[in-house]
């Protein structure tokens, strides 16, 4: 799954650790999502969308 998490995080000058704390996950989880090695759960995707004040579709896109 493609995502804009790294770009959105960089725009806010947040580290992976800061984003992980805000989303209540590990830094390793953020790293894996940003690299496309892990797809977030639906609750985590909703949490990220609320944090960035965007829709889920504006952050995460399927690979097609």
Image (cartoon, rainbow, N blue to C red):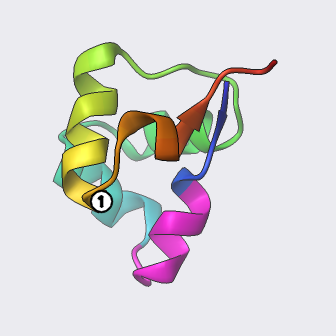
| Quarter occupied by residue 47 | top left
- How would you classify the magenta stretch by its main secondary structure? helix
Q: Is residue 16 above or below residue 48?
A: below
User: Which stretch did the figure color magenta?
Assistant: 6-14
Front residue of 33 and 64: 64
Badge 1: how crowded within 10 Å, few (<14), some, or many (20+)?
A: some
- The quadrant of the image that shows the C terminus is top right
Q: Is 13 part of what is drawn in magenta?
A: yes
Front residue of 8 and 17: 8
- The residue under the point 59% across, 52% down is 4
Return the residue found at the far right: 64
| Quarter occupied by residue 46 | top left
Instruction: Report the side of 52 relative to 10 (left or right).
Output: left
Q: Is 9 part of what is drawn in magenta?
A: yes
Front residue of 35 and 42: 42
Q: Report the number of numbered marks.
A: 1
| Quarter occupied by residue 19 | bottom left
- The residue under the point 27% across, 36% down is 25
Is disc 1 placed on a helix, strand or loop?
helix
Image position, residue 54 (x, y; %) = 33, 53
Instruction: Report the side of 64 relative to 27 (left or right).
Output: right
Q: Is residue 1 above or below residue 27?
A: above
Q: Is residue 40 above or below residue 19?
A: above
Q: Which residue is mark 1?
A: 52
Q: Is residue 17 above or below residue 58?
A: below
- The residue under the point 19% across, 48% down is 50
- The quadrant of the image that shows the N terminus is top right
Instruction: Report the side of 56 relative to 47 (left or right).
Output: right
Image position, residue 40 (x, y; %) = 44, 22
């Amino acid at each position: 799954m493609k995502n804009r998490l790294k770009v959105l995080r960089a725009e806010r000058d947040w580290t992976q650790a800061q984003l992980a704390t805000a989303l209540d996950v590990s830094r390793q989880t953020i790293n894996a999502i940003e690299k496309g090695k892990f797809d977030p759960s639906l609750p985590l995707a909703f949490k990220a969308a609320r944090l960035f004040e965007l829709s889920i579709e504006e952050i995460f896109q399927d690979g097609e």
